[in-house]
Image (spheres, grey):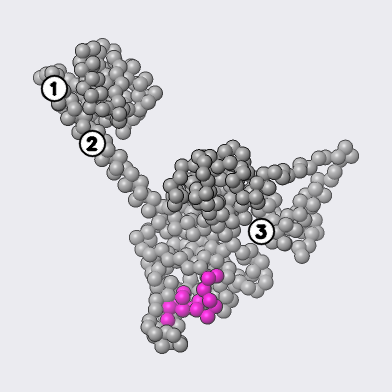
Amino acid sequence: MSDDILIVDDDDSLRRMMEYTLQQASYKVRVVNDGDEALAAVRNRRPRLIITDVKMQRIGGFELLTQVRQDFPEVMVIMVTAFGSVESAVRALQQGAHDYLVKPFSRDALRLAVDRALSFAALQQENKELRQRLDNKRGVSLLTESPAMQRVLEVLDRVADAEVTVLLRGESGTGKELLAQRLHQRSSRADKPFVAVNCAAIPHGLIESELFGHVKGSFTGALKDRKGKFEQADGGTLFLDEIGELPLDQQPKLLRALQLGEIEPVGGEVRSVNVRVVAATHIDVEQAIADGRFREDLYYRLAVIPLTVPPLRQRPEDIALLARYFLRNSDYNRSLALSATALAALQSYSWPGNVRELQNLMQRLALLCTADTIELSELPESIRAGQAVAATPFVLPASGYPLEELEKSAIVQALQQTAGNQSRAAELLHIPRHVLLYRLEKYGLKVS
């Protein structure tokens, strides 16, 4: 049986005829006597179609139609009216009914009207899904319930149509390229190219050619003219991943492209490009600037809008959501559940590889798990171990303990665990980096 149909009529014989006819046509049917009962039935379980008489003793068909169109606009309505009442039929259509039946009507007429209404409803749903897919193209769909991630998306969407550079900072695997795609697809450049390049993956000697292109014969192996990534992205968005790994000697050329909108291919002439740049890095840029590995002027040109993407361990609300999504959408088409203990272990794990690590794990479990539920025993030892060892809470001794000493101890431990990386230490302590720097100065702590 398919398609939930609600019949509303206080005429017992007509109601029974419609119910029997539609059940014989393999429809799932509910029946009620009047508009009051109909509204209660719709709120309890929404039907796809309502067939209602115009005249009933309590709430009439028009009142029911008005209420349904207001509260449940996706529900189709067919009105049943008396012979000769053309005005009622016209009024029903004007107020949003899909169709009408004039009494007396045949079983075939009833089936035909229902088939037409449900076919139209299916077409509406198909169009709605198509619009949603098109909307997703305009803005990449990101699954998150994390307030921290929601704040990132809010800022990202706000600046999507502004011609400013954006720097996404965060650990590897947090989804920085996905965010860059969302930014592009929600901008006025959405119908132009989105080009991504990983600066860390290009050999040093080829970076200039890769970014800015070259002309034939400009160096050994340059057998023909080649457009660089900037020209490929002309009119659209260029995503420079791992920008912190860009060699120092190439940084002035990138700065020129950002400042003037001009590039110079190897062996070629200067030419103009219209490119919006989004960059990403996982390194501590401030430390790289202090070490002389990254130009400060380039950093400020890239980071007009700086955004820090939170790691997965700071988004515990997203772990169950993402894990179930990856299981449902794995290459192996498995519908698997997570046991409570397995989910607790996933949520207590630190996820150094972030969302990418979680996705790879769910893919592996979808392939290897033989039961319908993933148990704790099927998770990797590293994740099970994290569940077994609980953090020991601080116990205040009877003699008391100085709060400053406790805070200093936490800062020192965080710096030790991150090998002196101040940005990572600040994340472990759940404080902004500038607050950590203030605490270091306050307590006279040195970072070795």
Any magenta on residue 203? yes
Sequence order check, earlier mark of 2 and 3 = 2
Determine whether the residue tagged by mark 3 lies in a helix, strand or loop.
helix
Task: From the image, give the main secondary structure of the stretch colored magenta.
Answer: helix
The residue lying at 54 percent from left, 63 percent from top is 280
The residue closer to the viewer here, 4 or 306, is 4
- Tell me the CA gap for discs 3 and 1: 75 Å
Q: Is residue 150 visible?
A: no
Q: Which sits in the foreground, 365 or 179? A: 365
Name which of mark 3 and mark 1 comes first in the sequence: 1
Residue at figure coordinates x 13%, y 21% from the top left? 105
Which quadrant of the rendered structure holds the N terminus?
top left
Task: For marks 2 and 3, give the CA distance.
Answer: 57 Å
Q: Which residue is mark 1?
A: 106
Residue 448, located in which quarter of the rendered image?
A: bottom right
Amino acid carrying mark 2 in the image: Ser
| Residue at horizontal 78 percent and vertical 62 percent from the top | 446
Q: Is residue 136 above or below residue 62?
A: below
Q: Are the residues tagged 2 and 1 within 8 Å (C-beta)?
A: no
Where does residue 347 sit, x and y in percent of width and height?
A: 61, 44
**In x, y percent, where is residue 403?**
81, 45
Q: Which residues are magenta?
A: 200-214
Q: Nearer the viewer, residue 218 or 2?
A: 2
Residues at marks 2 and 3 touching, judged by CB atoms closer than 8 Å: no
The residue tagged 2 is 119
Calculate the distance from the C-alpha at mark 2 to the C-alpha at mark 1: 20 Å
* Mark 1 residue element: loop
- The tag on residue 423 is 3
